[in-house]
Image: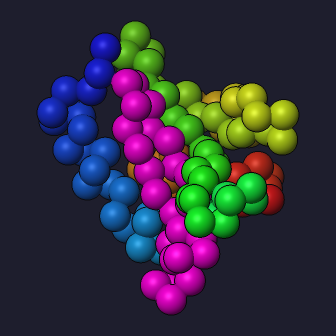
Amino acid sequence: MAFTEFETALIEAAMPAFMKKRRPPEKFRAKVDLAFRIVDQSVIIFSIRPSFRDRKKMAECPIAKATYVRTLKRWKVFWLCANLRWYSYEPCPLVARVEEFLVLVDEDNYSCFWG
């Protein structure tokens, strides 16, 4: 089940401050940028860079994901491992609000999101 319009609006209201803080300066965005996407019950943060195979094409590289679980009224937090599988972010696998997810990703105390 997808988010309601209200839930989508809450997510979209939370993202600009995070994006403003984390996006690279405009002069570098052709080489690397940051974006997010809402997919079903998840918010995915990803980088955008020229593809290694074809520098004229852009590639998306997922960084972090939060999936809302309605029955728990919580967000499950995930990080993408080098094997390209999503793993639960064990220091804090559940958060109550999307803003808490963004704080975890921004602080990255365990170097799971930004390396």
Residue 60 appears in view:
yes
Magenta includes 32? yes
Q: How many marks?
A: 0
Residue 106 appears in view:
no
Tell me the residue at 50%/42% (across/down): 44
Tell me the residue at 55%/28% (across/down): 76
Left or right position of 18 against 59: left
Left or right position of 35 against 3: right
Residue 31 x %, y %? 60, 75
Residue 90 x %, y %? 74, 33
Residue 105 x %, y %? 60, 54
Image quarter in which the C terminus is found: bottom right
Q: Is residue 105 above or below residue 42?
A: below
Tell me the residue at 19%/27% (across/down): 4
Residue 37 x %, y %? 41, 44
Q: Nearer the viewer, residue 83 or 77?
A: 83
Q: Is residue 57 above or below residue 79?
A: below
State the extent of the magenta-drawn residues as a range. 22-48
Q: Is residue 36 above or below residue 41?
A: below
Q: Nearer the viewer, residue 31 or 62?
A: 31
Image quarter in which the N terminus is found: top left
